[in-house]
Image (cartoon, rainbow, N blue to C red):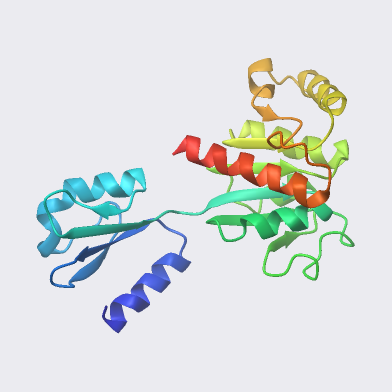
């Protein structure tokens, strides 16, 4: 691979946009391909199939050819509200899984760069914080503060923006109370039922790392379901 192409790959990956590296495994010729961009003439005959791989986020060799495609997806935004102990373990589990992670907590003694190195930390209330983050259907919310004054506004914003995943920490009783508050705020049952509460898959975990693992597993399952 040429140095110029490697530099372009690094820059494109850092831009957090989806792209594919197209390689002729016989000749070693390769290029970067992005959606709606012109493809190198050497690979133009395979454009339709290359688009299929890029759109389905798959890697592989095009049938009856020597063309290999490696795709790189745009990272999904994961907003974690509540910089508690569970959040530290959760970040460690998912930080290398193509997520752009944000930690939101107005309590600066919890949310700090020391506790969450190399992670986007915002020491503001959810309503203020969300205005600084690109939120859409490719975003996920995980609320861990166990404080309705912090968690509820974040959940409401996530519902309004139709996040693909919303999970909230708390017991069944806590979640039932949460649902009543959301109904009082004029959210429909259909919307409220999309919230994973209590959060995480059932593995019987009690400790902070076990709970974090169950949340990470549920989040990844929802990502794969979406794809």
The answer to whether residue 10 is left or right of residue 106 is left
The answer to whether residue 8 is left or right of residue 2 is right
Q: Can residue 38 be seen in this view?
A: no
Residue 133 percent location from the top left of the image = 62, 52
Residue shown at 74% from the left, 30% from the top: 197
Residue 48 percent location from the top left of the image = 18, 46
Residue shown at 76% from the left, 31% from the top: 198
Q: Is residue 154 visible?
A: yes
Which quadrant is home to the N terminus?
bottom left
Residue 58 percent location from the top left of the image = 34, 49
Residue nearest the observer in this picture, 23 or 208: 208
Residue nearest the observer in this picture, 210 or 191: 210
Number of marks: 0
The residue furthest top is 189
Residue 52 percent location from the top left of the image = 26, 44
Which corner quadrant of the image does residue 12 belong to? bottom left
Residue shown at 36% from the left, 70% from the top: 9
Residue nearest the observer in this picture, 210 or 129: 210
Residue nearest the observer in this picture, 101 or 210: 210
Which quadrant is home to the C terminus?
top left
Question: Is 33 placed above or below 55 here?
Answer: below
The answer to whether residue 169 is left or right of residue 191 is right
Question: Is 148 placed above or below 79 here?
Answer: above
The residue furthest front is 204
């Amino acid at each position: 691979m040429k140095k110029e192409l490697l530099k372009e790959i690094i820059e494109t990956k850092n831009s957090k946009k989806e792209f594919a590296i197209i390689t002729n495994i016989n000749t070693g010729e390769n290029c970067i391909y992005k959606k709606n961009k012109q493809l190198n003439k050497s690979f133009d005959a395979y454009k339709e199939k290359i688009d299929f791989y890029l759109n389905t986020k798959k890697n592989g060799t095009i049938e009856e050819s020597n063309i290999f495609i490696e795709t790189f997806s745009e990272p999904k935004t994961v907003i974690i509200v509540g910089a508690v102990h569970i959040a530290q373990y959760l970040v460690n589990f998912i930080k290398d899984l193509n997520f752009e992670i944000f930690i939101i907590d107005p309590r600066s003694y919890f949310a700090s760069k020391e506790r969450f190195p190399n992670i986007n930390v915002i020491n503001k209330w959810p309503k203020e914080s969300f205005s600084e983050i690109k939120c859409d259907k490719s975003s996920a919310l995980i609320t861990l503060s166990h404080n309705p004054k912090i968690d509820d506004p974040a959940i409401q914003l996530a519902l309004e923006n139709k996040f693909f995943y919303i999970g909230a920490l708390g017991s069944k009783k806590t979640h039932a109370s949460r649902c009543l508050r959301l109904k009082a705020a004029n959210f429909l049952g259909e919307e409220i039922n999309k919230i994973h509460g209590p959060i995480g898959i059932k593995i019987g975990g009690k400790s902070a790392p076990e709970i974090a693992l169950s949340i990470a597993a549920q989040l990844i399952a929802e990502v794969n379901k979406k794809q």
